Image (cartoon, rainbow, N blue to C red):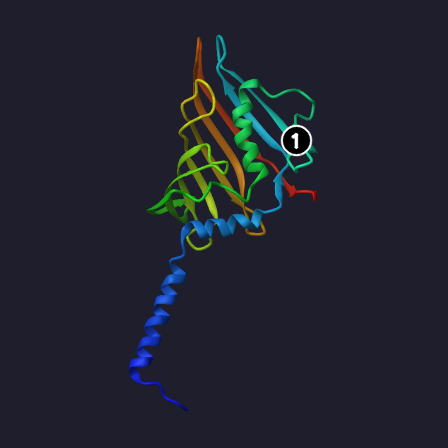
Amino acid sequence: MKIRPLRAQISLLFLGVLAARSACATDPWTLVQAQLQKNAGLVGNVIASTYELPGDDAPDTGSYQTHIQRWEKNGTPIRMSPDGSEPPKKSALALALAERFANHPDELFQTPESMVALGAASIDNRALSLYEVHGRFINGKLPINAKVWLDPASGALVKVAGAVTSAPVPGVKSIHFTLLYRTDSEGRSLPAKLTLDYSVNFFFHSGKILFAQEFVDWEKRPAL
């Protein structure tokens, strides 16, 4: 048997240690993307919403559900209330964000402009890593500042909380949101609950708008 010189053995050992460290130091966004890809092909069917909107004398509160009734030719699901009633007009922005997460659970943001580690954190006694992320939604138009809680080993998302800092709606400066994820029996991190709050100041109307939206069930997207 050929015996390697001691210097060669040390070099091989050093390279092995570097490779192991590199594997352990996987970019957190790469882990997140790998985890989200497990959701490819899924779409949220029912979105259950509760809301509080400004009223003339008192806040207007209520709840409703929308579910998939048909599909566009490009594969976009069209959701409506089961009774055919229209959701509150001021819910258009909230529904747009909720439907984006429901239609594309395999996406979160574009590749972040920055992702800074803030250290260890925990939610419900679960050991997590906390990051601060600056990026944009997938269409590139909405800037996002958010904190992301994730499992450091798998990249499974647990919570995302932040703000859309340039809202595309007159009278709205920023939108604060929290998106909670739930890990299902197959180990997928799926959106579970989205909460939104933002203030409207437009002409003579002003007030706070609050939404809480749950993603009730998930199904396979039909083939086009």
**Residue occupying the far left of the picture:** 7
| Position of 8 relative to 131 (above/below) | below
Looking at the image, can residue 155 be seen? no
User: Residue 75: x, y in percent?
Assistant: 66, 38
The picture places residue 87, in percent across and down from the top left corner, at 60, 21
**Residue visible at 57% across and 47% down in the picture:** 39
Looking at the rendering, in which quadrant would you find the C terminus? top right
Kind of element beneath mark 1: strand
Classify mark 1: residues with Cα within 10 Å, few (<14), some (14-19) or many (20+): some
| Residue 182 at least partly seen | yes
Residue 55, x across and y down, in percent: 50, 12
Image quadrant where residue 213 sits: top right
User: Which residue corresponds to the image point at 48% horizontal and 8% vertical from the top-left?
Assistant: 57
- Which residue position holds label 1? 78
Going by the image, does 185 lie left or right of 159?
right
Number of numbered callouts drawn: 1
Q: Residue at x 32, y 72 (%)?
A: 14
Q: Nearer the viewer, residue 108 or 127?
A: 108
Which residue appears at 55% of the width and 23% of the height? 92
Instruction: Report the quarter where the N terminus lies.
Output: bottom left
Q: Residue 126: give x, y in percent of width and height.
A: 42, 48
